[in-house]
Amino acid sequence: MSAHITIRKALPEDMEGIHALVYELAVYEKAPEQVITSPDIYRADSDGEKPWFDCLVATLASGEIVGIALYYRAYSTWRGRMLYLDDLVVRESMRGGGIGLMLVQALCKIGLEEKAEVIKWQVLDWNEPAIRFYRRLNAHISTEWYNCTLDPAKMQAVVDL
């Protein structure tokens, strides 16, 4: 199947397809109500001199987007340059055909070109298909670190301390 797939950088007109896959992932992860972004927000945040994110898309010959690797540049004080893979999504009906691997390979090429010391991402502890895929890539899956977040209300509370 992957012979008919093209991997390329996302364009502004791809944001509807990207958003649809992100929403599909949110449904799979039982949290669709947490998606507050939109294709318009994606267009704005991926544009300009300092875009908030980059995205690779996997497309069929028809142009339909069937996979994404949405990532951004970050910095590790211990390791240096880092790419953070925020979401790797392949349309459910297309999984198992090598598209995820093609997206990760393309991201790894970018990481090597940009001299990144690490590519980092998260996986839910119950997402066994994804964990199996990442183990096949020989990825280190840490169980040592907890995720910490601050939403805008909590950010304001910290400012107000």
Image: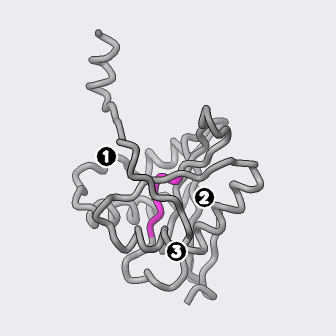
In the picture of the structure, the residue carrying the numbered disc 2 is 11
Which residue position is annotated with label 3?
A: 136
In reply to whether residue 45 is colored magenta, the answer given is no
Where residue 87 appears, x then y in whole percent? 46, 57
The residue beneath circle 1 is 36
Residue drawn 54% across the image and 77% down it: 99
Q: CA distance from mark 3 to mark 2?
A: 30 Å
Q: CA distance from mark 3 to mark 1?
A: 32 Å
- Give the residue type that dot 3 points to: Arg
Q: Earlier in the sequence, mark 1 or mark 2?
A: 2
Could you tell me what secondary structure mostly forms the magenta stretch? strand
User: What residue appears at the point 63 percent right and 61 percent down from the top-left corner?
Assistant: 107
Vertical side of 124 occupied by 72: above or below: above
Give the residue type at disc 2: Leu
Would you call the spot at circle 2 few (<14 residues within 10 Å), some (14-19), or many (20 or more)? some
Residue 135, x across and y down, in percent: 48, 70
